[in-house]
Image: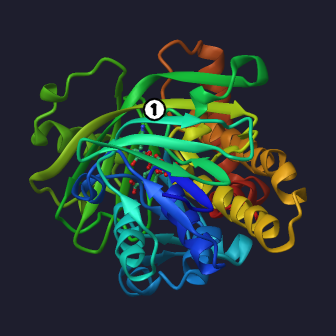
């Protein structure tokens, strides 16, 4: 097979890039290790910046999001059992969209069948070849047959565990990493949310988060030790702990119900530079990971592919390599700002087991500053709603 751009991975990054290229008349093929059913069942975060919703609007894949998504004008932080309301719309004139990444992915996959964007599902043993040339290609096993796709460019949208990043020589790259000494235990339940907006809580027993997927489906998280056993958290224990951490202003509105999904995720900050080597480009989690505090993962995947699609279109339409040459620096400038924000929000809201009393008091002072300073709230709001592209 031959195409213009071969995209590895059909997560949000690969799917949005494929659609942006198809819209501009550039051929792309997506190759994905998992099955479609597996990808459509993955539970991920659910807060979209307007930079991301604008991209979905540009693709005209925003119909269901506009019908079913929830536009939020603010976000809340509980500290010392008091609710601090951050008026995102009042401070920035913008809003965030609460719509699950699972739903975004489903919408993008559904549109791919209508729009001539081929996705090869269930590929195995993928290799990336000749990235030092103008004639790169990938090989893989599909239905036990060896396949080869030749392209002008390969884009690795294959997430943190995918093979693309490893194809770039260590001598030409650098990675930066931070791990956190705790995880997030997530629970999804078909119960109404406890608050009309998302609530993040800093409590002496650890962080908690109240989010939602709809007015009938809630998503909650609790900070847990890094080696926590999921079996130690029957539903009732989760609900009891959530009520304590969300505090007296929010807890009375919690509706309990059976978990339809429960899992533990580790937190990590990671950046790989550069995001390009020869004919191979990286986008999304393949190049960077943020801790989920602030929900920037999908939004960064969206900004990467917005930049990269512009650059690829410039190359295919005008023969200019300027955009491609500047892609890595341009994307990383935004990535690092989101890394900074996600790290800062994680630092502000969690209990770090090794913090000294001095560091604890600094965290308290910062929460107090946030509660009382419009400048501090504007800073949070501007980053939460998303920096401009
Ligand atoms: N061959 C083909 N596909 C692969 C391979 C491989 N060897 N390895 C990984 N993949 C696929 C994965 O199965 C996955 O579907 O690449 C895809 C990567 O998707 P995501 O992990 O969703 O990453 P990305 O598209 O960058 O999205 C970033 O989504 O995953 C969340 O937390 C993440 O919010 C962030 C956002
Ligand atoms: C979610 O709804 O799953 C969610 C919301 C906000 C976050 C992370 C996850 O910061």
Q: Is residue 210 left or right of residue 177?
A: left
For this rendering, which residue is in front, 336 or 242? Answer: 336
Q: Position of residue 165 (x, y in %)?
A: 59, 32
For this rendering, which residue is in front, 192 or 188? Answer: 188
Residue bearing mark 1: 161
Q: Position of residue 287 (x, y in %)?
A: 62, 38
Q: Is residue 87 visible?
A: no
Above or below, 69 against 328 in this view is below
Which quadrant would residue 306 be assigned to in this image?
bottom right
Above or below, 355 against 121 in this view is above
Q: Residues within 10 Å of mark 1 (few under 14, many from 20)?
A: few
Q: Is residue 241 left or right of residue 199?
A: left
The figure's colour scheme reads rainbow
Q: Determine the residue positioned at 76% across, 35% down.
A: 274
Q: Is residue 317 left or right of residue 39?
A: right
Image quarter in which the C terminus is found: bottom right
Q: Is residue 34 visible?
A: yes
């Amino acid at each position: 097979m031959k195409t213009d751009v071969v995209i590895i991975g059909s997560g949000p990054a690969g799917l949005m890039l494929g659609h942006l290229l198809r819209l501009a008349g550039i051929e792309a093929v997506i190759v994905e290790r998992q099955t479609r059913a597996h990808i459509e069942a993955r539970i991920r975060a659910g807060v979209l910046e307007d930079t991301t919703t604008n991209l979905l609007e540009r693709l005209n894949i925003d119909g269901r999001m506009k019908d079913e998504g929830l536009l939020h004008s603010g976000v809340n932080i509980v500290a010392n059992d008091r609710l601090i309301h951050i008026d995102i719309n009042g401070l920035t004139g913008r809003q965030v969209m609460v719509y699950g990444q699972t739903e975004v992915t489903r919408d993008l996959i559904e549109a791919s069948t209508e729009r001539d964007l081929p996705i090869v599902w269930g590929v195995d043993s993928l290799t990336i070849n000749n990235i030092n040339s103008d004639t790169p290609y990938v090989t893989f096993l599909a239905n036990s047959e060896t396949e080869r796709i030749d392209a002008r460019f390969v884009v690795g949208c294959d997430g943190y565990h995918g093979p693309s990043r490893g194809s770039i020589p260590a001598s030409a790259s650098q990675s930066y990493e931070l791990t956190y000494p705790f995880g997030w235990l997530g629970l999804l339940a078909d119960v109404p949310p406890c608050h009309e907006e998302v609530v993040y809580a800093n409590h002496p027993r650890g962080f908690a988060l109240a989010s939602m997927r709809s007015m009938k489906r809630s998503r909650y998280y609790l900070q847990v030790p890094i080696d926590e056993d999921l079996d130690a958290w029957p539903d009732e224990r989760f609900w009891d702990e959530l009520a304590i951490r969300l505090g007296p202003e929010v807890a009375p509105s919690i509706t309990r119900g059976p978990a339809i999904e429960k899992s533990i995720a580790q937190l990590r900050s990671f950046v790989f530079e550069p995001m390009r080597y020869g004919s191979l480009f990286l986008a999304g989690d393949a190049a960077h990971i943020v801790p989920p505090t602030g929900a920037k993962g999908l939004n960064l995947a969206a900004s990467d592919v917005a930049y990269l699609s512009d650059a690829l279109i410039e190359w295919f339409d005008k023969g200019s390599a300027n955009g491609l040459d500047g892609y890595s620096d341009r994307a990383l400038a935004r990535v690092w700002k989101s890394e900074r924000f996600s790290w800062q929000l994680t630092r502000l809201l969690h209990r770090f087991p090794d913090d000294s009393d001095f560091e604890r008091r600094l965290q308290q002072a910062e929460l107090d500053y946030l509660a009382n300073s419009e400048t501090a709230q504007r800073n949070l709001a501007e980053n939460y709603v998303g920096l401009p592209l």
